[in-house]
Image: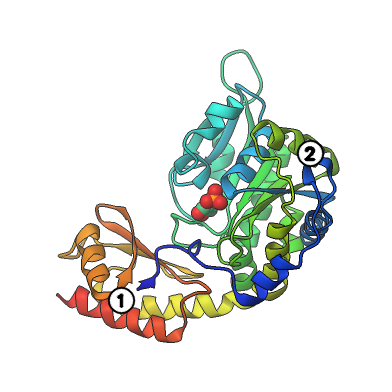
Amino acid sequence: MIDLRSDTVTRPTPGMREAMATAEVGDDVYGEDPTVTALEAEVAALFGHEAALFAPSGSMANQIALQLVVPPANELLCDADAHVVTYEIGAAAAYGGISSRTWPAVGGDIDPDVVAAMIRPDGYFAVPTRAIAVEQTHNRGGGGVIPLATLRELRRVADDAQLALHCDGARIWHAHVADGVPLIEYGRLFDTLSVCLSKGLGAPVGSLVVGSAEKIERARLVRKRMGGGMRQVGVLAAAGRYALAQHVERLAEDHAKAARLAEAIAPFGVLATAVRTNIVPLDLTKSALDAHTLAAAAREAGLLISVLGPRTARLVTHLDVDDAGIDRAVEILTRVLRG
Ligand SMILES: Cc1ncc(COP(=O)(O)O)c(C=O)c1O
């Protein structure tokens, strides 16, 4: 089976397993795991922030960060397709008492003026806005990259209204590779970031919250409260450190594979947007096939894809699919789409 459902399906490479097996560990709840401490320092430095905190998942890292910047009964602005309000099962409301309001989904093509117009000030009559969240790259937005100029403009909007700016950077590495923007350049634009090691970077588990020393001290408490304090977790941090050293620059290969898939299916009129990174979004509104029929036929032929809606589907390239796998996927998709 060729599995293009998600970049979360990768398995640790032999080199990564070796790094995990030989990791020095301690009890991280006591702050005594040297591998976790090293990973946290490394990631903080990559983004030019004072500190970082290892978390079990991207969802938890996002939710910890949101609780740092939006008090209960205050408001977060984000887009309607954002992971934080689509796939995190109402966590912002359930754990943080956070009220969320969304701008219409536009992937990475955010208009800062639209966001600025939504901001509500402190006062008696409305829920005050406290933070803006963006997603880099944008998952449901087909791996779209928010341009640096847009992010700078959003920073200005946030500063003018004294709001925090959060980045769900589960795939910020892909944006860095696609646009050539240094991670530190992204880092300095945000008050908080969550960055993930277990998507394109291929680690089995782990994300980090990145921010100021004061915020990360509070984040440690929030993580513990959410049940995310972990013990000898250096075995997982070692996988993350290995991924950062070995698997960032190679993301360009995944982007090239996604571009090949996009080129092959474009003649069938099913490409939802131009492909920039490792996600190929399919819009089947003009196709004879709906998403379930396409996915079932592909599975039958040996290819797994994700169904996102009745007429939307997704292919994601990653570390565990090589060029021969992409050749085979192209063959299967063109055959099924031709009907
Ligand atoms: C953009 C984005 N943010 C956050 C997450 C959450 O990560 P996790 O599955 O580790 O909770 C995902 C997962 O796919 C994602 O795509």
How busy is the neighbourhood of tag 1: few (under 14 within 10 Å), some, or many (20 plus)? some
Relative to residue 219, is residue 211 depicted above or below?
A: below
How busy is the neighbourhood of tag 2: few (under 14 within 10 Å), some, or many (20 plus)? many
Q: Which residue is mark 1?
A: 265
Residue visible at 66% across and 38% down in the picture: 64
Q: What color scheme is it? A: rainbow
Residue visible at 78% across and 41% down in the picture: 29
Q: Quadrant of the C terminus?
A: bottom left
Query: Quick check: can you spot residue 68?
Result: no
Q: Nearer the viewer, residue 61 or 312?
A: 61
Q: Secondary structure at mark 1?
A: helix
Q: Position of residue 236 (x, y in %)?
A: 68, 58
Relative to residue 55, is residue 234 depicted above or below?
A: below
Q: Nearer the viewer, residue 188 or 235?
A: 235
Q: Position of residue 287 (x, y in %)?
A: 19, 65
Residue 63 falls in image quadrant: top right
Residue visible at 77% across and 64% down in the picture: 23
Q: Position of residue 1 (x, y in %)?
A: 35, 73
**Total labels drawn:** 2
Q: Position of residue 192 (x, y in %)?
A: 71, 45
Asked if the residue at label 1 sits under 8 Å from ligand 1, the reply is: no
Q: Secondary structure at mark 2?
A: helix
- Residue at the limit of the structure toward the front, as seen here: 21
Tell whether 29 sits left or right of 322.
right
Query: Quick check: can you spot residue 138?
Result: yes
The amino acid at mark 1 is Ile
The amino acid at mark 2 is Lys
Q: Which residue is mark 2?
A: 215
Relative to residue 216, is residue 288 depicted above or below?
A: below
Mark 2–mark 1 Cα distance, whole angstroms, equals 45 Å
Q: Nearer the viewer, residue 201 or 151?
A: 201
